[in-house]
Image: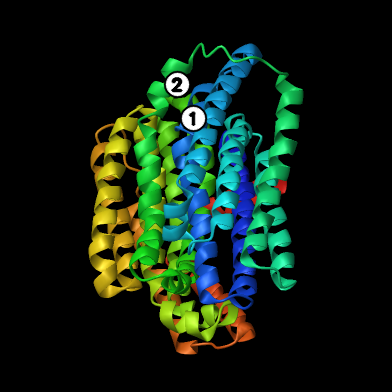
Amino acid sequence: MNEYKRFVQRIGLVGITNILISISGLIFIPIITKNFSVFDYGIWAQVNTTIALIPNIANLGLPYTMVRFLSAENDKSKIKESFYSMLAVVFASSLIISLLFIIFKNPIADSLFGGNINILYLVSIISFFACMNLMIISFFRTFQQIKRYSLFLVLQSYIGVLISSYLALSGYNIETVVLGLLVGYFAVFIIMLLMIGGYLGLAIPKFKNLKEELEFAIPTIPSNVSSWVVDSSDKYVIGIFIGSAAVGYYSPSYALGSILLMFLSPFALLLPAVLPKYFEEGNLKQINIFLKYSMKYFMIITVPAAVGLSILSKPILLIITTPEIAINGYLITPFVCLGAIFMGMYGITNNILILEKKTKILGKIWILVGFLNLLFNIIAVPFIGIIGAAIVTLFCYFIALLITVFYSRKYLELPYDYISMIKIAISSIIMGIVVAIINPNGIWNVLITIIIGIVVYLLVLFLIKGINKEELNFFKTMINES
């Protein structure tokens, strides 16, 4: 039980970290939307979309491979060798991709950044440091140094956002505002590199275990890239077929719905680092406990949040953006919220295939889903507009979950408590009816309605025994001991 308490405490820490990161993004939305045109905001959205894409390719799946191969390793010399070997490979691949961006600068800038070459240069540099930071920060994740991991994630986000906010409010152009992001990534890169270098010391990589590591890592690249295709390529398609202004309408609503994915991050971070130990010991019962309760806690939080965000989408967007963006984009949020729930269920379930080292299955799933997403977006966006992109994203997340469930059930018990899910859904629907009746407008009314909704949801959930006393006592004990 002590192991599980530590696991839940770490989930709480990572959860708070992701909430802070999500808040930083929401804080910046009103700053940029109210100080720049919708066109410029569309460019900003494409910048962040591109920065999210490049690490999925350049890192070659090695950050996750480090977690799987080194989390149970105690030999410092082996850790040093594997870490520096993987880091060297990521350095080379990141540099190559950044240079390719510069070589093909004109067509890329025309397609994504409204022809702004300066933005492209900045994005290529930021992407390089984003790749390196993802690899380095995975070191702390691998050895469950969660406080340091969380600290660096927050610093990377807030340094960039604070500098970019200052530049935007001071009247600088969009190129200078993007420069603020670079400062955040570079500062965290230097700090982390010095810290790990001081702990491990320096070493020339010999690539002893690289073949085995790449055999595990390479099949995850299609999964990572295709996952990005499903999550973010819709912005590219919208920009190409409808224009940057449409991306500006789409992105805030998408960001609002995507907040739910921050509740997946703690489980996606910690489960792969915790479960291999029990799997190697043959303790499948303990694995099922971790997965089952992870799924339940994720659903308890995200299902009511999805209902609330869907109903309050328009008033929230009116607060954080402009009336033009809110009116054109608020219907996107419900589709993204439901898709985020499916993605979260997938993100917990897929640990079964990862433990079995069936990463090729995951790769094939996301190749299929990524292809369908891109194809359907190209068909839907020109005819249905941004609503079509949201519907396609929802559909693709559902397909990814469905196929993953089909394969996972062959190896381990699925982590679904269907009775609890029904109770969570009932509580969320009742809460949603109350929120819809209130129909708030303005920041204070929205905040009061959110509080009322939370109280109603928890009350109903407790009354229908969606949370039992044992779970409540467990959390009380955990909090008292933390």
Q: Is residue 39 above or below residue 199?
A: below
Tell me the quadrant of the picture where the N terminus can be found.
top right
Q: Is residue 114 above or below residue 359?
A: below
| Residue 291 located left or right of residue 28 | left
The one nearer the camera, 239 or 79, is: 239
Residue 479 rendering spot, x and y as whole percentages: 68, 50
Rounded to the nearest whole Å, what is the CA distance between mark 1 and mark 2? Answer: 8 Å
Residue 39 rendering spot, x and y as whole percentages: 50, 72
Instruction: Find numbered disc 2 in the image and state the secondary structure of the residue it sits on.
Output: helix
Residue 83 rendering spot, x and y as whole percentages: 59, 22
Residue 370 visible to an observer of this rendering: yes
The one nearer the camera, 253 or 414, is: 253
Label 2 amino acid? Glu
Query: Which numbered tag is attached to residue 213?
Result: 2
Residue 102 rendering spot, x and y as whole percentages: 51, 45
Q: Which residue is mark 1?
A: 62
Quadrant housing residue 307:
bottom left
